[in-house]
Image: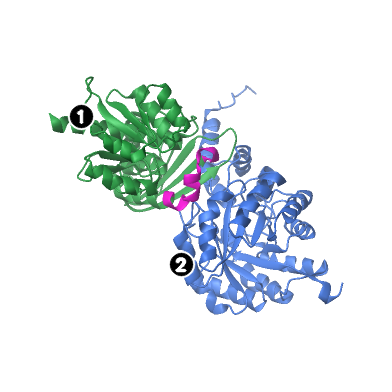
Amino acid sequence: MADADGKTRAAILGTGNIGTDLLMKILRRSAALEVALFAGIDPGSAGIARAHERGVPTSSGGIDAVLADGSIEIVFDATSAAAHRKHAPLLRDAGKVAIDLTPAAVGPFVVPAIRCDVGAERNLNLVSCGGQGTIPMVYAVSRIQPVAYAETVTTIASRSAGPGTRQNIDEFTSTTAGGLVRVGGAGRGKSIIILNPAEPPILKQNTIYTTVDGEPDRDAITRSVHEMIATVQQYVPGYRLKFDPVFDGNQVTIMVEIEGAGDFLPTYAGNLDIMTSAALAAGEAVAAQIRKAST
Amino acid sequence: MSAKEQKHIRVIDTTLRDGSHSVSHQFSADDIRRITGALDRARVDTVEVTHGDGLGGSSIQYGPSRLSDREMLQAAPPEMSHSKLAVLLLPGIGVQEDLEMAYEEGARVARIATHVTEADISEQHMKLARQIGLEVIGFLMLSHMEGADKIVEQARLMESYGANVVYVVDSAGAMVPDEVRQKVGALRGALGCHVGFHAHNNLGLAIGNSLAAIESGATVVDGSLAGLGAGAGNAATEVLVAALEKSGYETGVDLYGVMDAAEEIVRPMLKRPQMIDKGALSLGYAGVYSSFLLHTFRVVEKLGLDPRDILIELGRRRVVGGQEDMIMEVAMELKRRRDQRPEPEETAP
């Protein structure tokens, strides 16, 4: 249901750093979405206080509070993989579209720069920060020439890796590798993550290696990469190519860095910013699809 | 000192893991059989067999290996009746399934390595390893980059996850003996488990640092036959065994056996001599992860740069282990700077 001003009503579930950054992004940047509810399970959380200050309705009733409001059409889940597995069927039964920022991977993987369909599952999973940073580049190559193998290296500042990432680092590597194949179009995928504790913190960087079938079409691939960078920049302004793709035999090396927008999280946390930015882009795409279907 | 009073030192040979950097991860099944056979006959306590960057390390980033992880491990156990088989895993590169596979193939020791400040990413892997029956050893890489207090804090985490040994790892071969004594001594005082030391020879100190570590309470040290390993290589197992014996320690290793293995089996396999060339020395001097050396040589060959410039810049940026992709980035930047520099104007004679 759209508001009087035409905005689609959305809820954010999870009031931690990610949920709060997404809240600030929607408040500052979105003409299509309204945060109808910011819900967690800890009434004393800093995120709840921050939302309250800005006049956003809050609740510590968690998923139940979200389900109780029939006017909410889109739910961003920024809790945990285990929690999302419980939330997913409840949201589906309530007819809400879930945009999942956790590694639960209940629904299909979505990278807004490539495609973003509500689909039958009505549950969109945002892969991982490494996936959001690297899959567009794999796709930029594979849409020109078949990619037999894609391998990506994600290096993030230690300070931007929370306990969830640290205790589940395998989840990151396997989820990202799956996304390289399923969304990026690679035949096989491998993913590596490295934490760097340097101070001041480094920006998030991604190296994307692909091997293509046959001699790479250098001009077409370079052009495709630049176009894809521009597409991602529409929702992640700090997404930058470090230098033109490097060709070596049938191997193509692409390096990007990601500076966060600093909406709530610090700018070095590009790994988290690209997730909340992708969530917002996915939410707006879903809102447009809902509006189109109802007219 | 009588034989009874001699302190026992456990020697772990890493010819077939760290040493695989020296042959760009191209050991064959036959190479593995011959080397593990010789180490086992020489009664080396533990033998590590994995890609140089651990399980799952075969990649564009770190170099593909000739054999899969499983094939490498399968080549070893038939040759072993005394030595324990070990594998290395770096969380972020290898995954828990790799440990299960390694156990199936006969590994009984899992060495789990993280950057010196990031021990908490090893919890998952250490707990699983312990649960499936592997001895757990923790590796704090690039220990030269942090002070003793930080190393103690991180080592305590690894001990709490079930590590039986925690290593001070001088991945860059950048430590000097005083520093080794201070850091190993601090761990010895703070931990209930064993303390280990892994040396690189970039400053020519691999044996000296290993002895300094033992004097300060380490009871486990790493070596590799003929000193194979990343950068200038590790402490040579045969030299280590001889020096330990002369210092009054007991290793249980047959000195002639490891000497012969180094000379007759390993050295003939090398395509480039294992030595402290200017690149390797720059690693130690700048404090850069030793595995970067051969990758740097490959990049400079293509772009025509001085490898030392790249390594020193990587050190300045405090790049950590596994960031081999930064070599390309730094090289591209140095090349751009070089290309932008105006040609010196010709002056009339």
Is A271 in front, or is A66?
Answer: A66
Q: Which residue is mark 2?
A: B101
Which secondary structure is most common in the magenta stretch? helix
Which chain corresponds to the colour green?
Answer: A
Which residue does the image show at 43% across and 49% down from the upper left? Answer: A172
User: Residue B207: percent from the left, percent from the top?
Assistant: 75, 59
Quadrant placement of the N terminus of chain A: top left
In terms of secondary structure, where does tag 1 sit? loop
Vertical placement of residue A28 versus B162, above or below: above
Quadrant placement of the C terminus of chain A: top left
Colour given to chain B in the rendered image = blue
Labelled pair 1, 2 in contact (Cβ < 8 Å): no
Q: Quadrant of residue A32?
A: top left
User: Residue A22: percent from the left, percent from the top?
Assistant: 38, 31
Q: Is residue B318 magenta?
A: no
From the image, state whether disc 1 or disc 2 is nearer to you: 1
Start-end of magenta stretch: A157-172
Instruction: Give the label on residue A1, or none.
Output: 1
Q: Amino acid at mark 2?
A: Met
Vertical placement of residue B337 versus B236, above or below: above
- The Cα atoms of the two marked residues, 1 and 2, are separated by 52 Å
Count of number-bearing discs: 2
Mark 2: give few (<14), some (14-19) or many (20+) Cα within 10 Å.
some
